[in-house]
Image: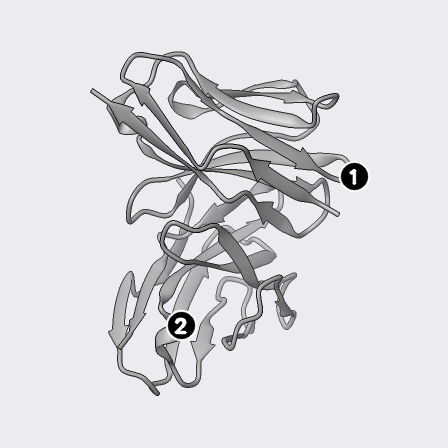
Amino acid sequence: AQSVTQLDSHVSVSEGTPVLLRCNYSSSYSPSLFWYVQHPNKGLQLLLKYTSAATLVKGINGFEAEFKKSETSFHLTKPSAHMSDAAEYFCVVSETGGFKTIFGAGTRLFVKA
Amino acid sequence: EADIYQTPRYLVIGTGKKITLECSQTMGHDKMYWYQQDPGMELHLIHYSYGVNSTEKGDLSSESTVSRIRTEHFPLTLESARPSHTSQYLCASSGGRHTEAFFGQGTRLTVV
């Protein structure tokens, strides 16, 4: 069975400081892992994905995530937050080659000027 | 740029009305999904489809129904809308070389 836990419902950072959004997962099989971002009144946009290639994955807008199998984690980071990064972020797990996709509860990122 | 479209974007409708939310994708994806998302809450899978003439219930029970007569089209229907159906409905598709799901902009439904 798959599950995904986003450890923080809200994260607040100042503009220009690092961002860390935490995600732990469980999966019986080799998982595919994704981070999506959702801006207010917009659809979901894929930030990055891990599909058993390099464990450090680079995405759009300066985001990256590292797959750590021993810790079952897939945390999202960015060195320097921008105001435009304020949004809801979803960590997602899907069994490789499988069908069902499980979303985390989401982390709302606030960026202070 | 993902080519998946949902219409309408916003819909306010009275109780008891029948509504259909449209979802179309031009990527030739075989898998399509409907998710329901209440404000500030997580996404829940309510329907999915492996391909034409295939539809399955998702993890969250829903009174809505879906059909998949054509690969590119996956409409969701509510026969009799109720205020409890007020939510955002997100359509997605995946397939081919894409392991990730592509999402539409969503339909925000309000039943009054």
Q: Say above or below: A6 vs B49.
A: above
Residue drawn at point x = 48 percent, y = 46 percent:
B102
Residue that label 2 marks: B85
Mark 2: amino acid:
His
- Which disc, if any, is residue A15? none
- Which disc, if any, is residue A29? 1
Residue drawn at point x = 79 percent, y = 39 percent:
A29
Q: Nearer the viewer, mark 2 or mark 1?
A: 2
Q: Is residue B97 visible?
A: no
Quick one: SS at disc 1?
Answer: loop
Mark 1: amino acid:
Tyr
Q: Quadrant of residue B89?
A: bottom left
Q: Say above or below: A105 vs A87.
A: below
Say left or right for A64 vs B11. Answer: right
Q: Position of residue B111 (x, y in %)?
A: 30, 75
Q: Quadrant of residue B5?
A: bottom left
Q: Say above or below: A74 vs B99.
A: above
Say left or right for B71 vs A38. Answer: right
Say left or right for B74 vs A100. Answer: left
Q: Say above or below: B101 vs B36.
A: above
Q: Quadrant of residue A45?
A: top left
Q: Position of residue A71 (x, y in %)?
A: 70, 22
